[in-house]
Image (spheres, grey):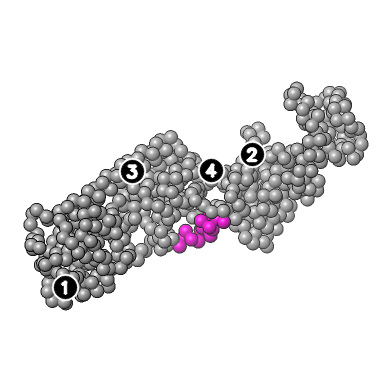
Amino acid sequence: MPDRREDAAIRTDRPSAPSAPSVPSADGGLPTVREILTLPPVAAGVPEVLSSESALDARVRWVHVSDSAGVARLLNGGELLLSTGSGWPTEPDELADFIVGLVEAGLSGLVLELGVHYRYVPAIVESAARERGLALVALHHEVKFVTLTEAVHSRIISEQTAALRARDEVRERFTALSLRGAPADYVVRQLADTLGAAVVLENLAHEVVAAEGAFGADGEVLADWESRSRRAHRRATEPPAAEPPATTTPGQGFSRRSDDWLIVPVEARGTRWGYLIALPGPTHPAGRTAVLEQGAIALALGRLAEGDADADEWVRASRQRLIDGLLAGRFAGLAAASARLVAAGLPLDGAVLHGLVATGAPVTGKAADVAARTLGGRAIAGDAPGSTSSGHATVVLLSLPASSSFGDRHASAFAHEIAGGGASADRLVLSIGAAAADLDGLLGSVQEALDLARAPGGRVAHGPTLRRGEDRPLMRLVTSLRDDHRLLRHSERMLAPLIEYDLARGGDLLHVLGAMLAHPANRTAAASASHLSRSVFYQRLALIGDLLGVDLDDGETLTALHLALLVRRSASR
């Protein structure tokens, strides 16, 4: 075999290295040494791996051909070196120093073609490469280095071209989302779908605003989120010396990795609102960092469009989605739902939980949380299902320390604070569900509060009105047995004639029956509650009695009708 020289026919020049090092990425579009060994021109040389398997995972940025002993000074890092070894040092110590120099120059791998100069790889070369984690491969058959470099460079360029196309697609997709004003949770969902991994948007307090992706029913992803997130940020702030520095994107702050978490800030014009975090997942041709940064840009543009007046829009929308999902049963299991609530800032373990419903006056989630903090707890609030501007109801999930009390004095102070005092506090009605110790009990407490809020009742003269489940024992029974088929059958059997009549004629018999049952001893008050004159009200009662075939003066009948009506109201929620 003729000696190879570093002549122009086979010499390969690399593009200059970037001015700043970049984060080595499993999704950067660069092939690994292991992947290069599978290319036909390399396989034709019968490659033998002489280093550790892990060294083959190094990414290759370019291929360089040289037999020179001083080749290390020509390297920029990330190259795969092809050589016959003809110009290498001959002394063992010099050979070892030669390998050390290649490693220090950032070489990704060394391929030595065996032939006339070296019939086997020197032991000192093999041991030095193993000690320093350098991929070392021996070729037992002669190959054309120019064919090999063409194959590798074609692979690198095609991968980079594909990465550029993928980045353009991602940029167009998230630019369109920002121009359409897509909400934060939808942007996060698109990120999770694009990356094929869990993505979390958190605020600066490390509370989860939105989370999408492959979450298990056991809630492992969000379990103990705040402390895990803080540890990840802390570790990412001071990366180990062996790690390259974090990347920087103009106008988009920084991105950083910690324990395989990719963290990108959401910020613009010197204001930071939170962080996007991508958990481990598959590679993406555009680069996972690039995808996450495009999502962060879309979110930042959305915050700029909202302006200062909507500074709490992320939190408000996040809490509303939580409330809607819990009340509609849209969660995989109690463990996963509990993890989401805790990650959103509502403690559950060792806490006393109450479901509350505020009606009669507007209540914001921020006001509810501020009032809860006054009691040493936390609160999450959102609109109740079916709320309108004329009949608005706010659901509040309240978490208090186990040692706290939520008696009438504290509840009244809480209600007064969330209403903002004054006339609003006088109009506020706060329905309070029973105390609970876990999420299952909290959901029952919320339903109890919703039933209380819907039931008619008087107001106090001054200050907020408090209603408690303990004051409505029959309603508490219905709430606890709301899914029992026997109760549902009883309600349908008792009220079916009235339901059919109202549906067919647009009638109000169920409403009149409810008013009568709310004021069983005072027909005048019942007529007033149903907004009818006494004569018309009595006509409605007579029609109800005829349709049902019952005596509305019989106590047992009234009790059965009251139970049936409570079950219907409860089941309709």
Mark pair 1, 2: CA separation: 76 Å
Which quadrant of the figure contains the N terminus?
bottom left
| Residue that carries the numbered disc 3 in the rendered image | 166
Camera sees residue 454: no
Q: Where residue 90 appears, x then y in whole percent?
A: 12, 74
The verdict on residue 228 being magenta is yes
Which quadrant of the figure contains the C terminus?
top right
Looking at the image, is mark 1 or mark 2 earlier in the sequence? 1
The verdict on residue 248 being magenta is no
Mark pair 3, 1: CA separation: 43 Å
Q: Residue at coordinates 68% horizontally, 62% vertically from top-left? A: 403
Q: Where residue 538 appears, x then y in whole percent?
A: 87, 26
Rendered image: mark on residue 317: 4
Camera sees residue 163: yes
Horizontally, residue 242 falls left or right of residue 397, namely left
Q: Residue at coordinates 91% horizontally, 32% vertically from top-left? A: 551
| Residue that carries the numbered disc 2 in the rendered image | 385
* Closer to us: 274 or 138: 138
Q: Where residue 563 appears, x then y in whole percent?
A: 81, 41
| Residue that carries the numbered disc 1 in the rendered image | 95
Q: Residue at coordinates 69% horizontally, 55% vertically from top-left? A: 436
Q: Where residue 452 appears, x then y in whole percent?
A: 74, 43
User: What kind of residue is marked 3?
Assistant: Ala
Q: Residue at coordinates 75% horizontally, 22% vertically from top-left? A: 505
User: What kind of residue is marked 4?
Assistant: Ala
Name the mark nearer the viewer: 3 or 1.
1
Name the mark nearer the viewer: 4 or 2.
2
SS at badge 2 = loop
